[in-house]
Image (cartoon, helix red, strand yellow):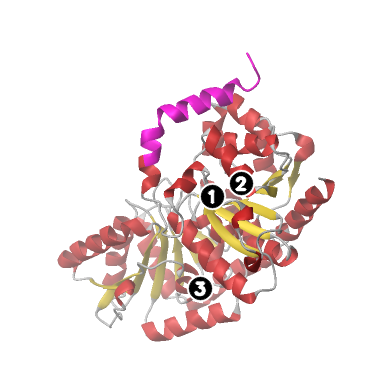
Amino acid sequence: MPACWPRLAYSAALYALAPLIWRRVWREQALAHPRRARLGLIPRPSSGTPADGQTERPVTWLHCASVGEVLAARPLIEALAASRPGHRLVVTTMTATGAARVQALADKLNTAGAGAIVSHHFVPLDFPGAARRFVARLAPVQAIFFETELWPNLLAACRRRGVPVAVVNGRLSPRAFARYLKIRPLMAAALAHVDWLAAKSDDDAKRYRALGMAEANTAVVGSLKFDVSVSDEDMRRSERLHTWLGERPIWVAGSTHPGEDEQLLGAHRRLRKTHPEALLILVPRHPQRFDEVATLCETQGETSGMRVARRSRDERPGPETSVYLADTMGELSTLYGAADIAFVGGSLVPIGGHNLLEPAVLGVPVVTGPSLENFSDVAASLREAAALTEVADAAGLAVTLAALIDDPVARARLGEAGRQVVTANRGALSRTLEGLDRMLTAK
């Protein structure tokens, strides 16, 4: 059988599932991006005018799945924009929330005007024709895929047009690796089109090689997440928010999921039995759940006496408010910085956790549940430095929160230990940039 048979079978499956796939992405819409972009129908670079500075700029393409990956890739986006001032940096996402984060960052970088022009497109669905059309119209000089975004037809389209491909911050959790092993021929064919893999850790590199990634094209550079930084303005926003919320114990539960919000509200009810003035800032992961979580908070509040304020409505939490629902986008770092303790969600349910370093870089004590597969390397670094507090369930979380609220010395120690872990592990960004630049030079 021909070597491309796994991709042919994969493409046939995509066509068979097309109605379901299209229905799934239909809601992921942004007004500035028509849905035909999902079929690779983006404007050709030549359709720009000389005034917009896009007609003769080489294109660097970076793909991130959603908002979490965009936030993790922010140091890389900023560094590429600064180091390639003559380029157009196109960042693609699958989700509308990711698109919003890219656009906000692009507006900031383009206003500064010192680097590449940054813009956003939705990534096309991975149908062969859509992938070929997208790559042909975008015509990138380099394609960079973030973490585990391995789309076989897009990778093949890049190889067909001679576009060098890198996978950066490459990670494969044990769970993802087990899934990919079931379709190893397809993954091996896809990875054959990857010119350079910048893996987060030795374990990630080994898993990629087990799927077919060439060892000669693999480097372990560390996690880009450690290269996160916080500006003075970010810190000032957090300080202003903390003052606005008042002098009371504050804990944030960030990036929460269905089945987890209920547990967190239960932990907060237990906490308030001993610390009735405590305030929970609840930050759901996905905006489409904001109203659902608000209803949950209000329903539970009717029986427990917990009152809720919504940030999207500019409702100020008063002394009688026990839950502040942060139903806005792009403010998680500010909210973490305003808290005494941070619980990172996606960890009391089997999601695999979220970025533990977002509160750690701010010097805020980090608490997490047991599900940490997606951030096992980061968790190991924090754990080794005694900078991570892990709980098994909501009851354990309530006990831990109460203990930390009563022990400011322990909170300060945990926060400083986390900050030092971030500082000590920086460097992946510079190693990644060096590898990407070598690829361009060798082209």
Dot in front, 1 or 3:
1
Q: CA distance from mark 1 to mark 3?
A: 50 Å
Instruction: Name the residue nearer the viewer: 317 or 263.
Output: 317
Q: In the picture shown, does residue 359 fall above or below 14? A: below
Q: Is residue 306 visible?
A: yes
Percent position of residue 349, x then y: 39, 48
Label 2 sits on residue? 137
Direction from residue 177 to residue 425 in the image, left or right: right
Whether label 1 touches label 3, CB < 8 Å: no
- Residue 18 lies in the magenta-colored region: yes
Dot 2 amino acid type: Arg
**Disc 3 marks which residue?**
411
Q: Is residue 5 magenta?
A: yes
Q: Are marks 2 and 3 in contact (CB under 8 Å)?
A: no
Q: Closer to the camera, 328 or 326? A: 328
- The residue range painted magenta reads 1-22
Q: CA distance from mark 2 to mark 3?
A: 52 Å
Secondary element at image label 1: loop
In primary-sequence order, the first of circles 2 and 1 is 1
Left/right placement of residue 21 relative to residue 237 reads left
What residue is at 50 percent from the left and 49 percent from the top? Answer: 372
| Residue in the image at 42% along x and 76% along y | 406
- Say whether marks 2 and 1 touch (CB < 8 Å): yes
Q: Residue at x 46, y 50 (%)?
A: 370
The type of residue carrying mark 1 is Ile
The answer to whether residue 168 is seen in the rendering is: no
Q: Quadrant of the C terminus?
A: top right
